[in-house]
Amino acid sequence: MDKQRRKFIRNSLMGSAALSMGPAFQTLGSEVKSIDSTEKVRIGVIGVRGVNWGNLNSALKRDDVECVAISDIDDNVIAGRLADFEKGHGGKPDVYKDYRKMLERKDIHAVLVGTPDHWHTLQTIHAMESGKDVYVEKPLANSIEECLALERAGNRFNQVVQVGQQQRSGQHWNDAADYLQSGALGRISNVKCFLNYGNSRKLEAVPDAEVPEGVDYKSWLGPAQLRPFNKARFHGSWRYFWDYGGGIMTDWGVHLIDMVLMFMKAERPESVMSTGGKFTFPDSAMETPENQIAVYNFSDFVMTWEHTMGIGYWPFEKHHGVVFYGENGMLLVDRSGWEVRANTEFSEEKGRNVFRAEPVPHQSNKGNDRDAHLSNFIDCIKSREKPVCDLSIGINTAINAHLGNIAYRLGRSVSWDEKSKSFGNDKAANALMKANYQNGYKLP
């Protein structure tokens, strides 16, 4: 791309930054009326291309929910979703290219946020400022600094926020956690989370191109670094670039690490180290690692996160899972269910090996985790109770995932200081926890 074109793009984006760096409304929280148990919850949707469309359809399985508005930066996506909506639910919601205009509406009770990760924090805080309850996809934030901003916002606004870590609502996950916390496996000293994208393909590098017709690219970039449009960094693969996401660690890693934190009732590790790289497809366009191992030292156990792309099966011939190793056996859990494989020891009394714990055969998953998670959110909108995955939980899990990525990017161990909310005197680590908003955007 020549210098003149780059200058034109930069001027065009910067000229619009003042219009998009903050909400276009006053704080409306005190003006939003509470709803009773018989009233329908009216929701708006921010980002309708990917998983958030599934979130909407889960919410609409309830008779007391209606979608009145959707917002997206891509006209092509909007057109397709309007057709999907009319076919599946009848009628058409109102459409907004600028989500802030949708947030000005006082008749909307809640919004579903399912945009690229670098937008989650701003859109969640703006929605809270406007008096809306929020269901926001994981990871809750794209940096630790954003996590801390969300923590401050949670203290300011009395809004219901559910983070899309839907396994928290899964019955079999909770059953497995109850079993582990019963103490049947004795002391748990080692936990392993793993994910294998065995059928993944190389992300091909492509040249920069013109912005596709109907796409508001400046709004898509938002606070991220100014760059020319590139298809490899857009729909479907944006999460593999540090500007917009944290790779597999903040995608699947958030889900599985969250289960370790829930099962073990853990918060922050004492230290984290990580290594990895692009070994399967060395010339892939992605910036985040295809293969990564992160070791988290908590006060009384060690957790290992491992992911890889483009190879065969991993442990237990599973695509993903969490394994809790205890004195008396191991618990293996994934989205299909859970089981316990017990250790044995020789019994003098019986003259043979006996199990140290009662084995538990595979217990299949029960119900739909996403449906249950959205239903819990709707219930809490009406009751004003705390949802099963509130801001504090989403913040804790996101910080843990970002710790792994920061250790990977530095190539060494890092230690988080909870008291100072920083890495202490570690300047390089502290720099990587920053949000680094650009194009005139400011972190609230």
Image (spheres, helix red, strand yellow):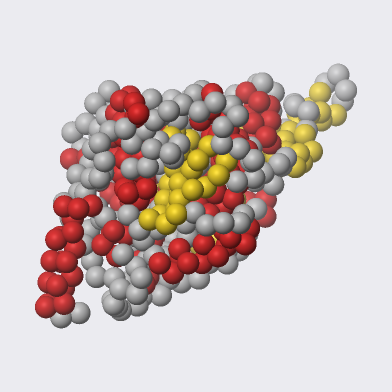
Q: In this view of the protein, can residue 144 be seen by the observer?
A: no
| Residue at 30 percent of width and 73 percent of height | 211
| Residue at 50 percent of width and 40 percent of height | 42
Q: 387 or 397, which lies in front? A: 387
Position of the N terminus, as image quadrant, is bottom left
| Residue at 64 percent of width and 31 percent of height | 174
Q: In this view of the protein, can residue 27 be seen by the observer?
A: yes
Residue 416 lies, in percent from the top left, at 31, 32
In the picture shown, does residue 264 fall above or below 22?
Answer: above
From the viewer's perspective, tell me whether residue 22 is left or right of residue 63.
left
In the picture shown, does residue 420 fall above or below 55?
Answer: above
Residue 243 lies, in percent from the top left, at 29, 56
| Residue at 45 percent of width and 36 percent of height | 109
Tell me where residue 314 sits by quadrant: bottom right
From the viewer's perspective, tell me whether residue 342 is left or right of residue 377.
right
In the picture shown, does residue 219 fall above or below 156?
Answer: below
From the viewer's perspective, tell me whether residue 53 is left or right of residue 183.
left
Tell me where residue 281 sits by quadrant: bottom left
Return the residue found at the far right.
350
